[in-house]
Amino acid sequence: MGNTDLSALTGDYTIDTAHSTIGFTVRHAMVTNVKGKFVDFSGSLHLDGSDPSASTASIDVKMESIDTGSADRDGHLKSADFFKIEEFPTMTFRSTAAESLGGEDYRITGDLTILGTTRPLSIDLEFNGAAKDPFGNERVGFEGKAEILRSEWGLTWNAALETGGVLVSDKIKLNFDISAIKNA
């Protein structure tokens, strides 16, 4: 963030889900990437412009809202083979640390819970800026990415391919485009 005075950004924010995306990319059949997103989620941020390490984030994702563009695939992902949404309807992230990496880059680390398993996750973020929108809302924007091994959360279903390899990669790329509105 350079020499920019960010103290004016300090405060509590609500993620604007209409202008935000929580998505993922997974290798399928060893040859292509399948992208998806979660449509129903909520979250909040506390930003400390003077001390970024005091910033926090909290996100709750409704697993039934998974959307990969294929109803059959989405149904399989919701089933007992993957997310078991009847038993585990929500995925959560709760931050435990935040740090400035210099420039517009930050890292937020926290606990990601999927299928009742909680493991640490670090998300690298780029601050995209702050602005007042036409409705008078103070907004901030971040773009983030992280990678996980789904097996570490108990997501182990797979199918072997005739040519070798597996149908679904273990590595999942997570993508975050976040727009948040400062609370009044």
Image (cartoon, helix red, strand yellow):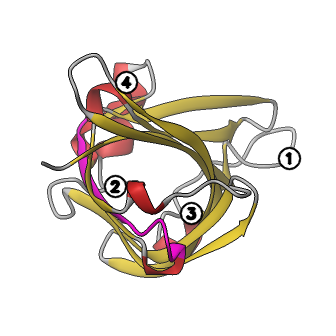
Residue that extends furthest to the right in the rendered view of this protein: 163
- Residue 86 in the image: above or below residue 57: above
Give, as a single range, the part of the protein colored magenta.
40-52
Residue 17 shown left or right of residue 147 in the figure: left
| C-alpha separation, residue under disc 1 versus residue under disc 3 | 20 Å
- Residue 140 in the image: above or below residue 61: above
- Residue 54 in the image: above or below residue 149: below
Task: Give coordinates of residue 133: x percent, y percent.
Answer: 32, 23
Tell me the number on the disc at residue 72: 4
- Residue 14 colored magenta? no
Crowd band around label 3 with a 10 angstrom C-alpha radius: few (<14), some (14–19), many (20+): some
Q: Is residue 48 visible?
A: yes
Instruction: Name the amino acid type tagged 2.
Output: Phe
| C-alpha separation, residue under disc 2 versus residue under disc 3 | 11 Å
Q: Which residue is mark 1?
A: 164
**Lower sequence index among marks 4 and 3:** 4
| C-alpha separation, residue under disc 4 versus residue under disc 3 | 20 Å
- Residue 48 colored magenta? yes
| C-alpha separation, residue under disc 2 versus residue under disc 4 | 14 Å
